Structures are given as structure tokens and as C-alpha cells.
Image: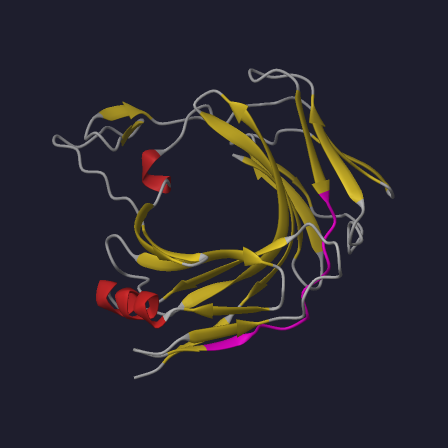
């Protein structure tokens, strides 16, 4: 799990949660890659007999206890403008703060996240403020056999941010696929036509969705997984699927 300081355009927020184990169904299968992009498919483990309500099916087809979210104790996010302290909220041990300044951290400003208690022991992570993406939802048209061009204003020189782009057109599939790209923050990305065609081949249903996130990420190992600290500017996209 992890924590995110997010600029969503009109407001900023901090939220996060950390589980005591990884849920296999949340780890996507990578079907193919090209350049900075990959076609992911949501995992759909199968267990027979079916798992009980307190269990989840693992990738090996075995029922395992469903992970629980852990209480890390007070979590502080420290920035130049001050400190935000959050406590785990019952019943799911979620952390969130929505009454923070907007934007929470200017581009290049250093942040620190610290948790000193809980089953994971002390956690210390660092982040860097990012340039805000332009207001409004970018418009993308996904067309069979064609490259999908994505553009945005490049980050300021020396920025540590990268941009993650996600496109999904099969909302109702049992194991829907999506294109996910992790690319330099240089202002442009061409999603290859081969990946677009593979996305169509995986299925088209429901309303398409996706978006882009400019972000920095720090992480630390914790048990079988890791805890991340993301500082991000995120925008949803207005996606059209060409007939």
C-alpha cells in the first residue's frame, strides 16, 4: 500500500492505506510491452471450492486469509508550509486529509512522510512537489490500427517527475485489459498501434476511462510488498472509442 499527496485540479488531498499482505488479484498480468507502454490484464484467480467471505483466492488457486489494513499509528506529512498529521480511521484503517492547502506543495518542494509505530516499525519516505497539469480533462480518441498520441506541457527543466498514462475500454470484462505507460515528463507520448489493436482485441464494453498522472514516487520494502509515497498531479481523460 502507500500514501498519495494528490492535486486533482481544484483541490488537493492526502490519503493512504497499508495492508498486511498483497492481494494477488490486484497485481495485473503483463501481456505485452512496447517502448514505455504495456498491456495489462487484471488478474482473475480461480479457486474451487470458492473461498469464504474472510478469504481471497491466491494466484496459485488456493484460498488465503483476506489481508487486513494495518494501523501505522500517527502518520505525518511534512512540507515547507507545515505538517499534516493523520490517524488511522476505523473501520478500515484508512488515512486521509482533505482540508489541506491547494496546491499542497509547489514544484520542486521536498516532502517527508513519517510513521513511527505499528507492525511495520518506523517508516520514512520522501517526495518532491510536481508541476500541476493543466486544468480540464484531456480528450483522447482511441482508433483501431492507429497510434494514440498523448501530449501535455513538459515539466520544468530538472524536474524529477514522470508521467503515467492509463487507457481502458473494457469496463465489463471479467478480466479487463488496459494500456499503462510510464514515460519521461517531456510533453509527448505515442502509444503504439500494436498495443491499441491488442487492447481492442481484449474486448470493448461499457464507458472507456483513463487519465494521466504526473508524479514522483519513493518506496520502502515492507514484508512481502512495499510502502510507497506518491506526490502527484492527476487528471481524468475524456476518452472516445472510434467505431
Quarter of the image for the C terminus: give it.
bottom left
Span highlighted in magenta in the image: 128-140
Residue 94 visible in image: no
**Nearer the observer, 29 or 92:** 29
When the figure is inspected, residue 43 is found, relative to residue 88, above or below; the finding is below
The x and y percentages for residue 111 are 76, 39
Q: Is residue 12 left or right of residue 229?
A: right
**Nearer the observer, 199 or 2:** 199
The x and y percentages for residue 174 are 23, 54
Q: Does 82 lie within the magenta span?
A: no
Q: Is residue 220 left or right of residue 42?
A: right
The image quadrant of residue 121 is: top right
Q: Main secondary structure of the magenta part?
A: loop
The x and y percentages for residue 215 are 63, 51
The x and y percentages for residue 19 are 48, 28
Figure coloring = secondary structure
When the figure is inspected, residue 110 is found, relative to residue 91, above or below; the finding is below
Q: Residue at x 86, y 42 (%)?
A: 80
Q: Residue at x 56, y 74 (%)?
A: 138
Amino acid at each position: 500500500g502507500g500514501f498519495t499527496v494528490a492535486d486533482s485540479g481544484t483541490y488537493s488531498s492526502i490519503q493512504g492505506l497499508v495492508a498486511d499482505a498483497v492481494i494477488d488479484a490486484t497485481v495485473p498480468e503483463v501481456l505485452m510491452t512496447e517502448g514505455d507502454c504495456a498491456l495489462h490484464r487484471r488478474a482473475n484467480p480461480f479457486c474451487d471450492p470458492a473461498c469464504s467471505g474472510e478469504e481471497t483466492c491466491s494466484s496459485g488457486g488456493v484460498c488465503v486469509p483476506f489481508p487486513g489494513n494495518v494501523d501505522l499509528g500517527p502518520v505525518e506529512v511534512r512540507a515547507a508550509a507545515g505538517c499534516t498529521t493523520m490517524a488511522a480511521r476505523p473501520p478500515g484503517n484508512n488515512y486521509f486529509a482533505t482540508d489541506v492547502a491547494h496546491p499542497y506543495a509547489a514544484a520542486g518542494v521536498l516532502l517527508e512522510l513519517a510513521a513511527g509505530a505499528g507492525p511495520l516499525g518506523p517508516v520514512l519516505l520522501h517526495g518532491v512537489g510536481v508541476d500541476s497539469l493543466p486544468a480540464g480533462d484531456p480528450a483522447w480518441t482511441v482508433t483501431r490500427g492507429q497510434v494514440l498520441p498523448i501530449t501535455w506541457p513538459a515539466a520544468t527543466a530538472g524536474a524529477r517527475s514522470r508521467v503515467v498514462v492509463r487507457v481502458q475500454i473494457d469496463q465489463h470484462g471479467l478480466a479487463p485489459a488496459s494500456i499503462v505507460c510510464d514515460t519521461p515528463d517531456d510533453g509527448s507520448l505515442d502509444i503504439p498501434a500494436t498495443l491499441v489493436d491488442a487492447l481492442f482485441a481484449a474486448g470493448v464494453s461499457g464507458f472507456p476511462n483513463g487519465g494521466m498522472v504526473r508524479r514522483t514516487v519513493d518506496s520502502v520494502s515492507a514484508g512481502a510488498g512495499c510502502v510507497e509515497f506518491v506526490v502527484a498531479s492527476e487528471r481524468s481523460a475524456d476518452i472516445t472509442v472510434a467505431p
